[in-house]
Image (cartoon, rainbow, N blue to C red):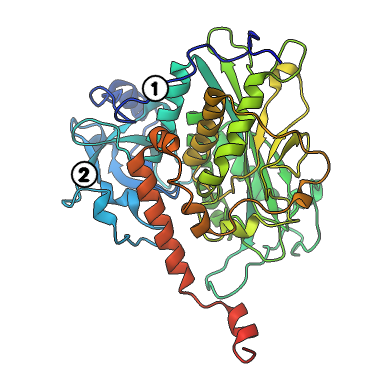
Amino acid sequence: MSTQSPNTPPSNTVIHQPESAFSTDAIPQSDNAAIRRWLTDNAISEVECIVPDMTGNARGKFIPAHQFLAEHDQKLPESIMVQTVTGEYTDDHWDFVEPTDTDMILRPDAKTLRKVPWAREPTAQVIADCYTPEGEPHPLSTRNVLKYILRLYDEAGLKPVVAPEVEFYLVHKNTDPDYELIPPKGRSGRREVARLSFSIDAVAEFEDFVEDMYDYADAQALNVDTLTHENGAAQLEINFNHGDPLDLADQVFVFKRTVRETAQKHGMYATFMAKPMQREPGSALHLHQSILNKETGENIFCRSDGTPTEAMMHYLGGLQRYTPELISFYAPNVNSYRRLAPDISAPINLSWGFDNRTTAFRVPNGTAENLRIENRFPGADANPYLAIAATLASGLLGMRQQLPPTPPHRGTANEAGVVVARTLEEGVRQLNDTPELQQMIGELFMRAYAAVKLDEFEEFNRVISSWEREHLLLQV
C-alpha cells in the first residue's frame, strides 16, 4: 500500500518534544463570566470543584457558589496526586512533590460545568485543570497528560476520535470485605445465576436503576448511547457516542460517579473493579479510536475504496509495540490482572484482527468513514485519561516510526498464549523502559506512577488470602 494516499497523516506528523512536556504560557484565566451566568441561570448554591487523581477518582472541594466566583484562586495540595489507592504515600513521595507540600492552582474548565442531579440542594460540578505556582501545567495531573498527547496530534494536523464502552456490575451491598460479592435482587426478588448476554428481560430486572441512571446522565449532558446486559450476572455495559478524547474522558470520569450514586439510591453498589467476582467475567473499558485529517475531515485509516491505509497499519504497529510498557495504564490495580487471563473474554496477547473479539486490537466491520480500531485491553478500573492517553500515544508513535503490525489473526487468539504482564508489579517494572514514552507522558509522572503502583503491590502482597490458608496451612 502506498504511503502517498491522501488519507495518510500530513508530512509534519513527526513532532520534536519540547524541553518540558507540559510547557505553556501563563496559566489561562477561567471563563468567570460564562461560569457566573451558568451558576446564576441554574440557581446553583454550591459547587464541587474537582480534579481526577491518579486512580481516576474525584478529589476537590465543596464551595458555596458566591465564594467560588470570588476573585481568588482555588487550590489543592499537590500531594493528593501521588497517594496510593489506600491513601498512603510512597517512600519516594518527596521526590515527586515539593517538601513544603505546595498547593496546585486550579483553573475550572467552563466546558465541564454540569449539575449534580443527586444532590439535595442545587449543586454544580466542574472539572479543574491543575497548574504549578509558576504557571506550568502540573506534571502529575492525569488530565494534563492527555491534553499534551492531544496537542501533539493537533501539531501534526490530526484529530483523534474515540468512543468508550464501559462495563460494570451491580452487586448486593457488601459492608464486610471478607464476604464475596453477590448479585443484587431484581424486581422479581431473585438474583441472577445464568449467563444472560444481551437479555432484555435481565436489564428490565433493574428498570428503576436504569431509568434513573439515564435521567442523571441526561441532566449532565453525558452522551451515552446504548445499554446492554453483558455476560456476567448483573453486569451491564454503556456505550458512549464517539467524539473528542478529552471530552469523552471527562464524561467517563463523571459517569462512574453517576452510576455509583444511582446504585446507592436503589440500595445496591455499582463496581468498576476489573474482576470483582471469581466466577464471573471481568469488566472492560474498550476504546474505539480513529484519526481524522484536520484539514479535510477524512478518516486517515481508510482509503476511498474502503481498504485500510498504511497509517492504520502503523497505528496498529504502535499499539502492539508499546502496550507491554503501558499495560499498567490499562490495568492499574492488583485486581486488574485477574481479568487478563485466558478464556474469560479479555486479551492476553498483542494480536489484532478484523471483527475478531478474541484479539487485543479489533477492527470492527463498518463503513469506510467509520473504519476504526478497538483497544480491548483497558479495564473498567482504568483512569480514563491515562487509558486514552496511552492508546493515542502508542498509535502516534507507531505512525511516526512507521511500525509494521503482525499479520491479522485468524481464529481464536486465546490459543496463542499469554504475552502481557500477569501482575501489577510485572507491568509497572516495564513502564520506564522507553525514552520516547517518557518524553510524551512526562518523566516525572512516569516515575511517580511507578512508585505509587509498586507501593500498592507491596501492600497487597502482605495480605494472606483464604486460598493460602485453605490449601497451604496443613499441606506444605
**Element marked by disc 1:** loop
Q: Quadrant of residue 151?
A: top left
Residue appearing at x 69%, y 17% in the figure: 302
Give the quarter of the figure containing the N terminus. Answer: top right
Sooner in the amino-acid sequence: mark 1 or mark 2? 1
Residue placed under numbered mark 2 in the picture:
103
Residue 100 horizontal side relative to residue 287, left or right: left
Q: Which mark is residue 244?
A: none
Residue 360 horizontal side relative to residue 69, left or right: right
Residue appearing at x 59%, y 84% in the figure: 469
Label 1 vs label 2: CA separation? 31 Å
Give the quarter of the figure containing the C terminus. Answer: bottom right
Q: In the picture shown, does residue 155 fall above or below 282?
A: above
Q: Residues within 10 Å of mark 2 (few under 14, many from 20)?
A: some
Horizontal and vertical percent position of residue 346: 69, 50
Amino acid on which the number 1 mark rests in the picture: His
Residue appearing at x 76%, y 50% in the figure: 414
Horizontal and vertical percent position of residue 188: 77, 60
Amino acid on which the number 2 mark rests in the picture: Asp
Horizontal and vertical percent position of residue 448: 35, 49
Q: Which mark is residue 16?
A: 1
Horizontal and vertical percent position of residue 178: 55, 75
Nearest the eye: 262 or 323: 323
